[in-house]
Amino acid sequence: MSESIKYLLDESRLPRFWYNLCADLPKALPPVLHPGTHQPVGPDDLAPLFPMALIAQEVSTEREIEIPGPVRDVYRQWRPTPLYRARRLEAALQTPARIYYKYEGVSPAGSHKPNTAVAQAFYNKEAGVKKLVTETGAGQWGSSLAFAGALFGLEVQVFMVRVSYDQKPYRRALMETYGARCVASPSTETQSGRAILARNPSHSGSLGIAISEAVEVAAQRDDTKYALGSVLNHVLLHQSVIGQEAIAQLEMAGDYPDVIVGCTGGGSNFAGIVTPFLGAQLRGGRKVRIVAVEPSACPSLTRGRYAYDFGDTAHLTPLTKMHTLGSTFTPPGFHAGGLRYHGMAPLVSHLKALDLIEAVAHPQLAVFDAGVQFARAEGIVPAPEANHAVKGAIDEAIRCREEGVARTILFNLCGHGHFDMQAYIDYFAGKLTDQAYDEKELAMALAGLPAVAEAA
């Protein structure tokens, strides 16, 4: 029987601060650059998109940033999230490993995304913003921002990648239930969307295109701001509550991870579970092996180039140094929609460049195999994105079995798959296939990377 190590929801158990890994990095992050001048951007450059409080967090090197009271009040609805010992999965794998998973699927939106959505909605409301515009892939982020917008009285518009818009109608319905307006991207509502459709009327969309549309709309009105669900420093900062809680929960269990596994698309849930442990290591604590697992159909960490690139397809955003497949790259429409982004968070990319983390990529069928095995052992159906972390953890447990070593493995189960059952229906019907990206398209996208002087 699985063992729950969930501690009481009281004032002493809920983190009071977000942890900022930038305070402990051995080498500072490369600066964000203006696309025209290639000089570091300042607060005024970001002000059309974000409130100043979030801009300050984006560039902060403070180790701890206090979580506002109203944000903690909302967090109390589901935080701390449970940490489970996967004893039945351990038995099924016949492994000496101890497997723990932090389960973020208990939030109202069913994933880790509200950890930052609530914070961003709060800061925008404080700044007098009336409307938030964003993009979403699988819909976990869009539904989370819709939830947060409803709590703080903000209008929310979501551009949802077309292939996911069609694949996941229940995520779309959830956003609308919370009061958001959901639009398939590319759309006819923006100049960038119309330009894409003019070239390809049946374009399946990408997160890069959806970001372009959201940024374009946000920049047109003073009372409207843009909200991003991953990639940026302040987003990863807000997710650090996951790892902080896991440290305390594992201490209660008398254990500590040897290996931490997380799925990676933009990098937020991965950073959330990893950065508090990595910060402790960088301050002289116990060393932990960290494994990022990504889809082989969109392998930014394992096949991408570490270079300056745009965060969107229409090139409306600043340049950040990240592992990228090129801003014009469009991945195939595999079911893990939240992992279909052309780039990786600059912070996660920086950790990879410093050899502080590893990265592996797996095809779609292998990760669904792992997800079904996990569901049959532990009873929780993972989201397609989370299946990548499950696959990574199972591989590590099998390695322990083969080597005869009892390691402790921790992974982040970042969301449930209750709105993704069509993917499982297709899997059981034999309709789910491994999908490969176009090598020629990747080469063209990488060839189009901005030319930025190395000194920058």
Image: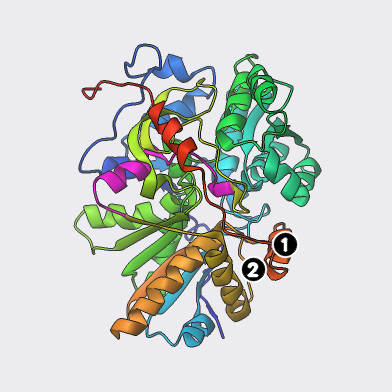
- The amino acid pointed to by label 2 is Val
Query: In front: mark 2 or mark 1?
Result: 1
Screen quadrant of the C terminus: top left
- The amino acid pointed to by label 1 is Met
Q: Please provide percent x and percent y for residue 432.
A: 65, 61
Residue 384 in the figure: left or right of residue 177: left
Mark 2–mark 1 Cα distance, whole angstroms, equals 9 Å
Magenta stretch contains residue 148: no
Which stretch appears magenta?
338-357
Image marks 2 and 1: residues in contact by CB distance under 8 Å: yes
Screen quadrant of the N terminus: bottom right
Residue 96 in the figure: left or right of residue 238: left
Can you identify the residue that label 2 sits on?
381
Kindly indicate the quadrant of the structure image that contains residue 126.
top right
Can you identify the residue that label 1 sits on?
421
> In front here: 137 or 26?
137
